[in-house]
Image (cartoon, grey):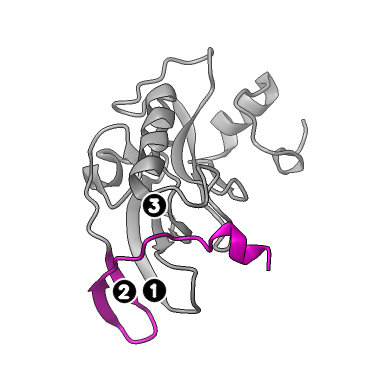
Amino acid sequence: MRDLREHAWRSSLSGDEARFIKSYVVGPCNVAGDSHLNWVSDLVWLDHADYSSESGSGSVGVEFAGTAVSSSSPFGATSSIEQCNNQSRLLVRDNEELQWQEGYYRGYFELQISQEKIEAQYFGLPSLETRNGYEVSLANFTVESGANRVARPVGGAKVENGALQTGEVVNTNLTLDTNTGEWFYHDFPRVTIPPTRNAA
């Protein structure tokens, strides 16, 4: 049997890989990046198992993906929050296993991993124009031990930005300055540095 660490995750598994996951791995979790988008997805063995997006049954694991801090959104460096969220809604609509997707903010995510659960916290940086400690809490997710899927309701059925399969997006722009501990509502016109400044 091949070592699963030798290759990137694919949307389909060989018979040996599927037996390995079923027999030896409790709650597989894939961590991805460098796509310049945030997402949380159930991992589904397409065309081999019944999958329910509503409950997550049939999922074989979970994938967490994040942006880079200094990258531009693939939805467009000067795109508005609403333009990016429209693209996120289309991606979620067309991919039932994709539970949350967000493409406006640049940022990072943290995973807290224990034997009982995995907790993921996503953060977005509202401005890259200056060096600062500003961050927006975008969404939080949980995977219970042995569940092999994102806990429902996904994200507590409420996230700051992007799109959810089920739930609501409530844009508040509530921002923490991690340097001072002060909270404020940001009104930055864009997240990423305009392309003309990058060229200088």
Choose between 191 and 95: the one closer to the eye: 191
Q: Which mark is residue 117?
A: 3
The residue at 60%/66% (across/down) is 197
Q: Give the percent coordinates (x, y) of residue 27.
A: 48, 41
The residue at 37%/25% (across/down) is 93
Residue 47 is left or right of residue 59, and the answer is right
Q: CA distance from mark 1 to mark 2?
A: 6 Å
* Residue 105: quarter of image: bottom left
- The reply to whether dot 1 and dot 2 touch (C-beta < 8 Å) is yes
Which residue carries the number 2 mark? 176
Is residue 44 one of those drawn in magenta? no
Q: Which mark is residue 134?
A: 1
Image quadrant occupied by the N terminus = top right
Residue 101 is left or right of residue 173, and the answer is right
Q: Amino acid at mark 3?
A: Lys
Q: Amino acid at mark 2?
A: Leu
Choose between 117 and 79: the one closer to the eye: 79
Q: Give the percent coordinates (x, y) of residue 21.
A: 58, 32
Q: CA distance from mark 1 to mark 3?
A: 28 Å
Direction top: furthest residue: 47
User: Dot 3 surroundings within 10 Å: few (below 14), some, or many (20 or more)?
Assistant: some
Range of magenta residues: 174-200
* Residue 189: quarter of image: bottom left
Q: Give the percent coordinates (x, y) of residue 31.
A: 56, 48
User: Dot 1 surroundings within 10 Å: few (below 14), some, or many (20 or more)?
Assistant: many
Mark found first going from the N terminus, 1 or 3: 3
Q: CA distance from mark 3 to mark 2?
A: 26 Å
